[in-house]
Amino acid sequence: MMTILSVNEFFTNHAEGLALLWVAGGEGNNRSLLLDPQQKLGNVGYLNLIHPHQIQIIGPYELTYLAALSTEEYQKTLAQLFENSKLACLIVVDSDEVSTTVTQYADRYQVPLFTSRFTGESLISHLHATLARLLGQRTTLHGVFMDVLGMGVLIMGDSGTGKSELALELVSRGHRLVADDAPEFCKVGPDTIVGICPLEMTPFLEVRGLGVLNVQALFGDRASKKEEALCLIIHIEQMTPNRVQTIDRLQGDYRVRRVLDVDIPEICLPVAPGRNLAVLLECAVRNHSLKMQGYNAADDFCEHQQRAMRVNEK
């Protein structure tokens, strides 16, 4: 499905992250960027007059090429560039200065002209990631999304199981809140899902009995984070004695949850009096990290046990 994004909306939402300055062509703010999920990487590229991109990047090499043209060829090239009806905007990189002629053409043809302090390669990489987020599949999950030890962790569970209290304790231990209650997840790559907080409500956490808290105001700027890749789901659950008996004492309660066609590991933590869930969650994250590196404590334990049994047999 095609997505239509005005250049003004694009600039308003992403200028800070892309270090953009609007220098000319202000009357072209209603020009549209047509985003096709099948061609999102083709929307951005260096100056190309034969197969023009919607967002044309002009770097030092392109500026050198234009400067070497004769006056007639220079004017003809600029006219060909700015007359293209598909052109959404033009971005000059690695330079804060734009020639008067280029800004005049931008104003004449009402084409937004930006500058960015990023290098061309870096800006294109950022633009591809930005467009991928705009075009990616999205879903909202109920829970608290956090950055724990550098890993995106979604805390899920029924209402009243203590998700927010657990999140508050984790923040007090130096971890970071991304989104409370309804984080939004977007698929930005074949196996990559990024979670954010809609409406820029990241610092706010609702805790029963305390109301809405601003963890950034309480614990400092590092208590919150705008986005993080989803790596692990922790499901906290009130368990019956029969349910507890079904948990594998050796391997734990591990499963997989499908989110936007990506398998995300999920761990179930039983809620019970006296259990320190913050410590258990931190250990779960550390243990998951070890598993990703190829180490499994249960397998290692079994190997030690088997070696001890062989020694005893002798």
Image (cartoon, helix red, strand yellow):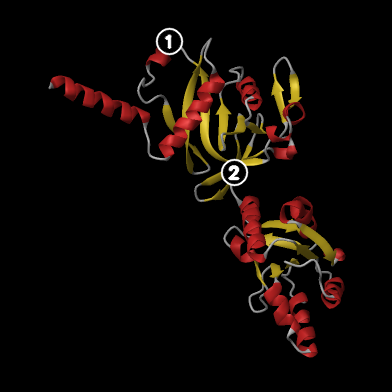
The location of residue 73, given as percent across then percent down, is: 75, 88
Quadrant (top left/top right/bottom left/bottom right) for the C terminus:
top left
Which residue sits at x=72%, y=70%? 86
Image coordinates of residue 118 in percent, x first then y, are 70, 61
Per the model, the C-alpha gap separating discs 2 and 1 is: 36 Å
Q: Position of residue 88 (x, y in %)?
A: 74, 66
Q: Which residue is mark 2?
A: 194
| Residue 1 appears left or right of 24 | left
Foreground mark, 2 or 1? 2
Asked if residue 84 is positioned above or below residue 142 in the image, the reply reads below
Residue type (three-letter) at the residue carrying disc 1: Pro
As rendered, which of 4 and 163 lies closer to the eye? Answer: 163
Residue 235 visible in the snapshot: no
Q: Residue beneath label 1, please?
A: 241
Which mark, residue 313? none
- Residue 121 to residue 61: above or below: above
- Which quadrant holds residue 180? top right
Q: Left of 71 or right of it: where is 222?
A: left
Disc 1, SS: helix
Instruction: Pick whichever of labels 2 and 1 is earlier in the sequence.
Output: 2
Work out which quarter of the rendered image holds the N terminus and state it: bottom right
Q: Position of residue 262 (x, y in %)?
A: 49, 43
Q: Which corner quadrant of the image does residue 208 belong to?
A: top right
Amino acid type at mark 2: Val
Q: Residue at x 82, y 61 (%)?
A: 22
